[in-house]
Amino acid sequence: MAAYEEQKERDFYFSKLRDTEILCQTPKIEDSPIVAAIKRILYATDEADGAEALSPIEEKAILETQNRKKHLEHRCRCCWKYHLLRQRLSDVSDVHCSGSPLLSY
């Protein structure tokens, strides 16, 4: 059974790689720097092939992607803190409206 699951998982990831390869061959984007970097990763035969120096454009694209990811992570943390604050304020208002004997007003 494990061999079947391993083969199923291998086929799943192979289909993703194949879809990526087909997308990279789309005429409109085929010559973009990011597609060139993806193709280099797809066609690398060992670690040495994937470790080639990136062009300045490829480095810029990778840095922009990393910066976008950091920005989104920061926004998620801020939204989470805001949600917690709103929840706490909501909880406090629920205590006041519940007629709690601890409140004397």
Image: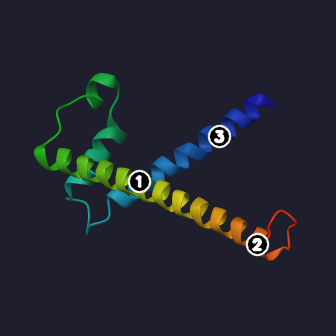
Q: Secondary structure at mark 1?
A: helix
Tell me, yes or no, whether the two marked residues, 3 and 2, touch with CB atoms within 8 Å: no
Q: Which residue is mark 2?
A: 96
Query: How packed is label 2: few (under 14 Cα within 10 Å), some, or many (20 or more)?
Result: few
Residue 58 locus on image (x, y percent): 19, 47
Structural crowding at the residue carrying mark 1, measured as other residues with C-alpha within 10 Å and reported as few (<14), some (14–19) or many (≥20):
few
Camera-side residue: 78 or 53? 78
What residue is shown at x 32% (from left), y 33% (from top)?
44
Q: Which residue is mark 3?
A: 9
Amino acid type, label 3:
Glu
Looking at marks 3 and 1 on the same chain, the residue that comes earlier in the sequence is marked by 3
Q: CA distance from mark 3 to mark 2?
A: 55 Å
Callout count: 3
Residue 2 as seen in the image, left or right of residue 72: right
In percent of width and height, residue 31 lies at 19, 59
Q: Residue at x 54, y 50 (%)?
A: 15
Q: Quadrant of residue 97?
A: bottom right
Classed neighbour count for the residue bearing mark 3: other residues with Cα under 10 Å, few (<14), some (14–19), many (≥20): few
Instruction: Name the mark nearer the viewer: 3 or 1.
Output: 1
The residue that mark 1 highlights is 74
Answer with mark 3 or mark 2, whichever residue precedes in sequence: 3
> Which quadrant of the figure contains the N terminus?
top right
Whole-percent x, y for residue 70 in the image: 36, 50
Q: Cα distance, mark 3 to mark 1? A: 33 Å
Labels 2 and 1 touching (C-beta < 8 A): no
Name which residue lies at 17% across and 33% down.
53
Report which quarter residue 90 is drawn in.
bottom right
